[in-house]
């Protein structure tokens, strides 16, 4: 009896606690407030997102088109990751002023470097606009009609909401179109580069350590947003003033301990939380392995070249970083899904759903139809993957694509513009062509051979192709194409007339591109692809709706879609495999442990070593006297969250999110609290580098530091 009462009591006292999985909508955060506070948060949902007062959301921006940044001063100073600023740092670097290699620190506003094309987007307000978006949409509409109607409505709503203002509005679907939110934004177009550590710090560990824990990457860079005299967005002008944000983040030097509450506020890009078993299987066991194999080929060639000299390193680093990033993540993702028996788990849920749906006409055919459509999709995705990872993997083929587009252009004005652009890009291309052509030729030949051996790509596609013969044939195509002769291509472009399209189409590389593309994906395939994707999207809309009806707990948060979200969790280590436990934080000691002057990724800057040797950590040391570098926590994040502020219970900045642990990268599809950890750069290491390493006291003085 006593036991029964205790169990009953326990059940009554048990508050539903939401697991750490989830990327929550700021406007609806009130729903999570109690849970967040129970887990340690000391501020309110209103402090995070409010339309009535300045709040934390005013300090957050979408940095460029795929990262997050945050204001840390009242003069528009912005922190983000080094890898988010990377392409701008690279673009402003030359061998003489190599900011990538040596770092850069503006000592005054005048020294800050404009970054044309870079934007910072601040959310002004958001609103649920489901009713207006779905106005006039009926159940009997097919997807094409439905999408047209929705696009129409969206245009009207966004126009109405921005007319007469400098705002830009976008509307995004949630839960596969069961709900719509509008985001009214302010887009700043004058963003300047202020500071970056050298790559030895900002990219320490490079692609070897990427996605891995324990981690020691000082992954930050510093920018500044400028505005017109009225503090509103303005295109670059020397007269622009630093933007004064409504709110900037306070920086805390207190650090965090295991189990401390943290939250991440930023722009996660894409997740597929509600994917079916077929989708999970397709990713883990079909497309990921192909992508990985083909990227291995490219990476081997680029890495060999990069290890030869500094010029080639500079040339390839940006593209290698991006190729290697997906390459490694997909490996972790596939392993993670299979470790979790992800496909079987999804199947088990689908059986439950089907049982529930059997007597509901609206839902009973959803999963069988999913299965049918995924069978078709699987086939086309296979080919798509070969197209993007093999056919257009080399520069000669991407350039053949451009040339082909020119050949089929009819509008004279477009032809003229395209030719002009092509002349410019070709001038650049041939600057260091001799070394590059060796790399590109090898990539071209090897990726094509791989695809053909797998039975794809049309011409002589078969497992028993005579590889030597094929290499010879591809080599000839490479050498004989106008695309590999500066003289020939420039001659063609400089006097280009519409009738020259014939010459283009006869070029062996362009012809190969066309035949491979058409053999892989016929016009029918492409048509079918659109149809199947539309149908699958419709089915997901029903599936997710059904899941909610079945049990509201099935669907707790919407998939990431590059809109502002809050994820929360706590600092915690994890057990990646039997016998190993990963602690939750790393220190400068680990950098010295990894140091290896012979390996590019592990070279330690002399100045950093000096600071290490004298233990000159100042106010940035933790209570044990160590200099913390990074920590992990259970926040649910994904690509796009890079640069996101990681905040403590008081809403103060304690770090910059920059990665996830490799063992948990399946979290885009399946979140496992035992393995999924986000990786954060400890703000104390970031400030230590700015202050002690670079001596950029001017930047430290701008911050609001809480001790
Ligand atoms: N893995 C991180 C992300 O997904 C960092 C990528 C950049 N770093 C690199 N070594 N490639 O964006
Ligand atoms: N590095 C990623 C980014 O650029 C974040 C890592 C992740 O995918 O979680 O957004």
Image: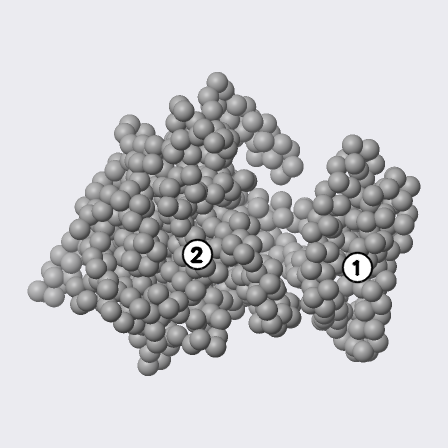
Residue 522 in the figure: left or right of residue 626: right
Residue 153 in the image: state x and y as whole percent: 55, 27
Residue 61 in sight from this viewpoint: no
Q: Is residue 422 above or below residue 83?
A: above
Residue plotted at (12% across, 61% down): 6
Residue 484's disc number: 1
Q: Residue furthest front?
A: 96
The residue carrying mark 2 has its beta carbon less than 8 Å from ligand 1? no
User: Sequence-wise, which precedes: disc 1 or disc 2?
Assistant: 2
Residue 681 in the figure: left or right of residue 477: left
Give whichever of 410, 242 is nearer the camera.
Answer: 242
Q: Residue furthest left?
A: 2
Residue plotted at (57% across, 60% down): 314
Q: Name the element at disc 1.
A: helix
Which quarter of the figure has residue 512?
A: bottom right
* Badge nearest the viewer, 1 or 2: 2
Residue 67 in the image: state x and y as whole percent: 46, 48
Which quarter of the figure has residue 665?
A: bottom left
Give whichever of 580, 669 is nearer the camera.
Answer: 580
Residue plotted at (37% across, 46% down): 107
Residue 362 in sight from this viewpoint: yes
Point out the image quarter for the N terminus.
Answer: bottom left
Q: Name the element at disc 2.
A: loop
Residue 103's disc number: 2
């Amino acid at each position: 009896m006593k036991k029964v009462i205790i169990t009953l009591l326990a059940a009554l006292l048990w508050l539903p606690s939401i697991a750490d999985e989830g990327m929550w909508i700021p406007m609806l955060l009130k729903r999570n407030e109690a849970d967040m506070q129970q887990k340690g948060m000391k501020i309110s949902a209103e402090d995070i997102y409010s339309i009535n007062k300045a709040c934390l959301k005013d300090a957050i921006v979408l940095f460029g088109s795929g990262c997050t940044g945050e204001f840390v001063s009242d003069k528009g100073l912005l922190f983000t990751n080094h890898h988010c600023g990377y392409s701008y740092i690279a673009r402003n670097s030359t061998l003489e002023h190599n900011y990538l290699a040596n770092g850069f620190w503006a000592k005054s506003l005048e020294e800050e470097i404009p970054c044309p094309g870079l934007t910072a987007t601040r959310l002004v307000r958001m609103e649920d606009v489901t009713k207006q978006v779905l106005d006039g949409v009926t159940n009997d509409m097919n997807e094409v009609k439905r999408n047209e109607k929705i696009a129409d409505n969206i245009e009207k709503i966004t126009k109405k909401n921005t007319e007469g203002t400098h705002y830009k509005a976008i509307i995004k679907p949630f839960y596969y179109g069961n709900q719509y939110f509008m985001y009214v934004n302010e887009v700043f177009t004058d963003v300047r580069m202020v500071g970056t550590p050298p790559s030895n710090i900002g990219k320490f560990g490079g692609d070897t350590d990427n996605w891995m824990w324990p981690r020691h990457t000082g992954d930050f860079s510093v920018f500044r947003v400028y505005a017109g005299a009225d503090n509103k967005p303005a295109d670059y002008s020397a007269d622009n003033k630093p933007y004064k944000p409504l709110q900037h983040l306070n920086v805390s030097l207190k650090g965090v301990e295991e189990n401390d509450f943290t939250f991440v506020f930023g722009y996660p890009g894409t997740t597929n939380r509600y994917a079916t078993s077929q989708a999970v299987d397709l990713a883990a066991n079909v497309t990921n392995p192909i992508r990985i194999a083909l990227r291995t080929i490219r990476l081997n060639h680029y890495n060999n070249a990069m290890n030869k000299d500094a010029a080639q390193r500079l040339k390839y680093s940006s593209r290698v970083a991006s190729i290697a990033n997906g390459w490694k993540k997909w490996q972790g993702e596939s392993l993670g899904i299979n470790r979790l028996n992800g496909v079987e788990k999804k199947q088990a849920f689908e059986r439950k759903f089907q049982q529930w749906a059997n007597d509901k006409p609206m839902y009973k055919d959803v999963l069988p139809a999913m299965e049918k459509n995924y069978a078709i999709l699987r086939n086309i995705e296979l080919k798509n993957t070969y197209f993007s990872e093999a056919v257009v993997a080399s520069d000669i083929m991407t350039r053949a694509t451009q040339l082909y587009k020119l050949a089929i252009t009819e509008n004279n004005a477009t032809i003229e513009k395209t030719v002009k652009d092509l002349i410019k890009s070709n001038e650049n291309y041939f600057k260091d062509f001799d070394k590059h052509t060796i790399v590109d030729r090898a990539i071209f030949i090897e990726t094509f051979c791989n695809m053909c051996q797998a039975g794809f790509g049309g011409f002589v596609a078969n497992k028993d192709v005579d590889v030597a013969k094929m290499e010879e044939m591809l080599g000839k195509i490479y050498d004989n194409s106008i695309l590999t002769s500066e003289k020939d291509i420039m001659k063609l472009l400089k006097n280009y007339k519409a009738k020259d399209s014939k010459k283009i189409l006869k070029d062996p590389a362009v012809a190969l591109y066309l035949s491979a593309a058409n053999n892989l994906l016929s016009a029918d395939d492409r048509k079918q692809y659109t149809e199947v994707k539309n149908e699958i999207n419709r089915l997901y809309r029903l599936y997710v709706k059904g899941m909610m009806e079945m049990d509201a707990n099935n669907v707790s948060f919407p998939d990431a879609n590059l809109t502002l979200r809050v994820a929360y969790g706590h600092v915690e280590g994890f057990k990646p495999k039997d016998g190993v436990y990963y602690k939750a934080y790393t220190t400068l000691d680990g950098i010295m442990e990894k140091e290896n002057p012979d390996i590019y990724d592990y070279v330690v800057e002399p100045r950093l070593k000096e600071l290490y040797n004298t233990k000159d950590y100042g106010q940035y040391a933790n209570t044990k006297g160590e200099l913390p570098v990074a920590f992990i926590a259970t926040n649910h994040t994904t690509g796009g969250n890079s640069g996101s502020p990681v905040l403590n219970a008081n809403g103060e900045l304690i770090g910059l999110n920059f990665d996830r642990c490799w063992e948990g990268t399946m979290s885009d599809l399946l979140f496992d609290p035992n393995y999924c950890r986000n990786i954060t750069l400890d703000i104390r290491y970031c400030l230590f580098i700015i202050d002690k390493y670079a001596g950029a006291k001017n930047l430290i003085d701008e911050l609001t530091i809480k001790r």
